[in-house]
Amino acid sequence: MRLLIAMMKHETNTFSPVPTPLARFRPLYGEAAIRAFRGTGTGLGAYLDLAQREGAQIVLPIAAGAPPSSPVDDSAYAHITDTICEAVARGGFDGIMLDLHGAMVTQNLEDGEGLFLKRLRAIDPNTPIAVSLDMHANLYDEIIANATVVTGYRTYPHIDTYETAKLAGEILLRAIRTEVKPVMAWGNEPMLPHVMRQGTDDHPNKELQHRCAAMSAEGALAASLFTGFPHADITNAGLSAVIVTNGDLKLAEDLRDELLGRAWVEREAFVYKIEPLQKSVARAKAMPPGQSGDGPIVLLDHYDNCASGGTMDATVVLAEIMRQGLEDVVAFGIYDPEAVQQAIVAGIGAELSLSIGGKIKMPAIPAENPPLTVTGTVKTISNGRYRNRGPMGRGVQMDMGPSVVFDTGAVEIVLISHHVEPSDLNCFLSLGIDPSQKRYVMLKSRIHWRAGLGPMAKAVVECAGVGVCTSDYSQLQFKKIRRPIYPLDLPNR
Ligand SMILES: [Zn+2]
């Protein structure tokens, strides 16, 4: 057996000013990609394991994944898709296994994945194609019409990326052996679930995803509910569902309708309520001090999550924490390669004032993003590399770029040079910080931090700051999204 395996992942925040050139994808090719992903808890890791189990020959033309940011440069999209299409055009494959995101917008395309799959199908009309997608996929007809099987994550934080691809791959292998004939039904609802309300530990997505899992006992080969990515001004942003069955389209449609109906009933529970920043920080300050080892109070700077397209250089929440005089804080972090270099030049132990953050303009949102001047000591200098301990992205090599811990006395501020969301314990441990021993941990994260850091948190305070992942949809100008859509337009009908 001969399998083509590839990865192309980007969640596009159309309001983000962060550029998305090819370099942001850090593409790996052939053997280098296989070496990087074999044995990891990722979609590619799952496909590689399946291929090995089957004794299949593997062709892996490219593995390219970028942290969320603005629409992908057309030249980057062309390079990645051309590389895969050229490999497919050489022919001789029994199956194609793709690890995609499903919310890729390019400078000229709303639906990067759909157009790519359509092109693949035109090159090779017969070879079955498995696609695993992120729960934040925004689905289009062409994604489903040009794939044999599509599966999506059932967890947020995404700790089942491996299992999702394994399921898609297993169905594909059964289809290759003609044991099953997959058919799919998909649909969407006019609703934009709020990302802060999408966690699968919480109502209502917890119950909705449980229902998806239960559908496998009722004849679904795979059932996926996508909560969608709302920070995308494209026609199909929002909630959708896909059901795969063995040749039974009616069953697929019925289960799809049931899932979409259940989600629509829960639409109000997907709406997020905002608390003013000053009040949130004061509430955190007033929480009684715990015993040593009780765990930290987590302050979420969730408007500026780089894993949703944030610049990660907004300082508003950090400034309020310092203004209200919170102590024993670690803040992860501020993206500021310039400040990092200034601290490195000053050297470990040097005392200095630094102007951090506020360097990236955010024209899509009305709020200001001022820099923050901090005075303190350079405590740690690092190359910023670590390997994820998991459960999310287990084993994947991460790179924060040159990184510094800057200590003001009250706050240890992590300054980094590449966008990395603090979702794994090792991003702290690699810098010599044990967050469990801190009174407060400020994180630029929304839900994923729960994967690696959730168990240690004593309490969580969500802080409304500034950023292109704003929880206040009224700050975003939607022009292309299908209307009406809840909660932007619709009354609670
Ligand atoms: Zn996601």
Image (cartoon, helix red, strand yellow):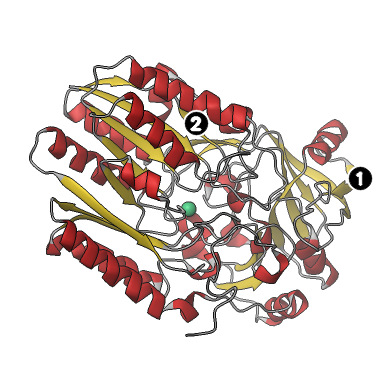
Q: Residues within 10 Å of mark 1 (few under 14, many from 20)?
A: some
Residue 199 drawn at (x, y percent)? 45, 66
Describe residue 123's horizontal placement relative to residue 10 as left or right: left
At label 2, which amino acid type do we have? Ala
Label 1 sits on a secondary structure element that is: strand
Residue 48 drawn at (x, y percent)? 29, 30
Instruction: State the CA–CA distance, disc 2 to disc 1.
Output: 39 Å
Instruction: Find residue 461 and report its image quarter.
Output: bottom right
Residue appearing at x 13%, y 39% in the figure: 174
Label 2 sits on a secondary structure element that is: strand
Direction top: furthest residue: 90
Describe residue 360's horizontal placement relative to residue 307 as left or right: right
Instruction: Find residue 320 and report its image quarter.
Output: bottom right
Work out whether residue 61 can be spotted: no
Residue 219 drawn at (x, y percent)? 13, 60
Name the residue carrying label 1. Answer: 352
**Mark 1 or mark 2, which is nearer the start of the sequence?**
2
At label 1, which amino acid type do we have? Leu
**Is label 2 or label 1 in front?**
2
Q: How many marks?
A: 2
Q: Residues within 10 Å of mark 2 (few under 14, many from 20)?
A: many
19 versus 361 height, above or below: above
User: Do the CB atoms of the residues marked 2 and 1 lie less than 8 Å apart?
Assistant: no
**Ligand 1 neighbours mark 2 (CB distance < 8 Å):** no
Residue 227 drawn at (x, y percent)? 44, 62
